Image (spheres, helix red, strand yellow):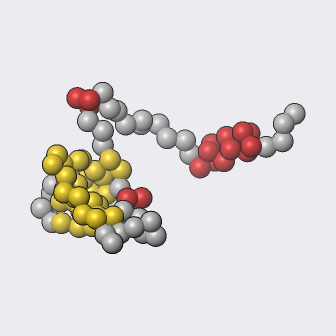
Amino acid sequence: MSTIHELQNTIDVETPLGYAKAIAWIDYGSQTNTVWKVVFYKDGSVRNFYDDDIKVYPNKMDGGEIETTFPSNQQLIKGLKRHFGPKE
């Protein structure tokens, strides 16, 4: 069984194809990622994206902010090795 949720307030998102607003999401169950239905600001076209293909922009009015410095893959792997590696 799938569930479709229409958003009362749209959410700004960044997709592989550009900046858009999410208008709904579709949950197909535990075996499939959630699908977001988005409308692009540049031309009004509508597309669907899996949730791992988009980034949600937090609302600054609510105190949200995007972290602008993300660790590189090498930094992340080094940190994981340091955390999970043998204890000295």
Picture residue at 72% right of the left edge, 39% below the top: 83
Residue 44 seen anywhere in this rendered image of the structure:
yes
Residue 49 seen anywhere in this rendered image of the structure:
no
Q: Position of residue 49 (x, y in %)?
A: 32, 64
Q: Is residue 74 left or right of residue 83?
A: left
Residue 10 drawn above or below residue 24: above
Location of the N terminus (image quadrant): bottom left
- When asked about the image quadrant of residue 33, the answer is bottom left
Q: Is residue 85 left or right of residue 42?
A: right
All told, the count of numbered labels is 0
Residue 19 drawn above or below residue 59: below
Picture residue at 46% right of the left edge, 70% below the top: 31
Of residues 27 and 51, the one nearer the viewer is 27
Residue 74 drawn above or below residue 31: above
- When asked about the image quadrant of residue 61, the answer is top left
In this view, the residue farthest toward the bottom is 1
In this view, the residue farthest toward the right is 88
In this view, the residue farthest toward the front is 1
Q: Position of residue 51 (x, y in %)?
A: 37, 59
Of residues 70 and 63, the one nearer the viewer is 63
Of residues 23 and 69, the one nearer the viewer is 23
Q: Position of residue 13 (x, y in %)?
A: 28, 50
Location of the C terminus (image quadrant): top right
